[in-house]
Amino acid sequence: MKIIIQFAVKNPVTLTMVILALFLLGKISYDRLSVDLLPDLNNPRLFVEITAGENSPEEIEKQFVKGIESMAMRQSDVREVSSLVKAGSARITVEYA
């Protein structure tokens, strides 16, 4: 540590040039770094999952799925609405343009 301090005191111009060179190299490297902190998230799908206990697929479709599908179709820029109904659960997928 003592050697570094002696070098800094004896050669202040050299030390200043080294520090400026490091800052310049860091600035150039930072400018060329292509990191997108907020990427363009374009996920035009909406998933709705319904859990309905022990109900049959027909009951789930009649009570829940038909209403949600009809509401989803009325929205703007909807490309496709699909559903998958199983015993006790349903999954509705809305795909937007």
Image (spheres, rainbow, N blue to C red):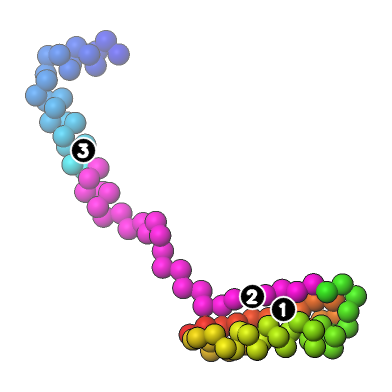
- Please name the residue shown 40% across and 60% down the image: 38
Q: Position of residue 81 (x, y in %)?
A: 62, 87
Few, some or many residues within 10 Å of mark 1 (<14, 14–19, 20+): some
Q: Are marks 1 and 2 in contact (CB under 8 Å)?
A: yes
Identify which residue, 31 or 5, lies in the foreground.
31
Which residue is located at x 9 percent, y 24 percent? 13
Q: Amino acid at mark 3?
A: Phe
Identity of the amino acid at label 2?
Phe
Asked whether 86 or 8 is in front, the reply is: 86
**At 39% from the left edge and 56% from the top edge, which residue is drawn?**
37
Disc 3 is placed on an element classified as helix
Secondary structure under the numbered disc 1 in the rendered image: strand
17 on left or right of 67: left
C-alpha separation, residue under disc 2 versus residue under disc 3: 48 Å
Report which residue position mark 2 lands on: 47
The CA span between labels 3 and 1 is 54 Å
User: Residue 23: which numbered mark, if any?
Assistant: 3
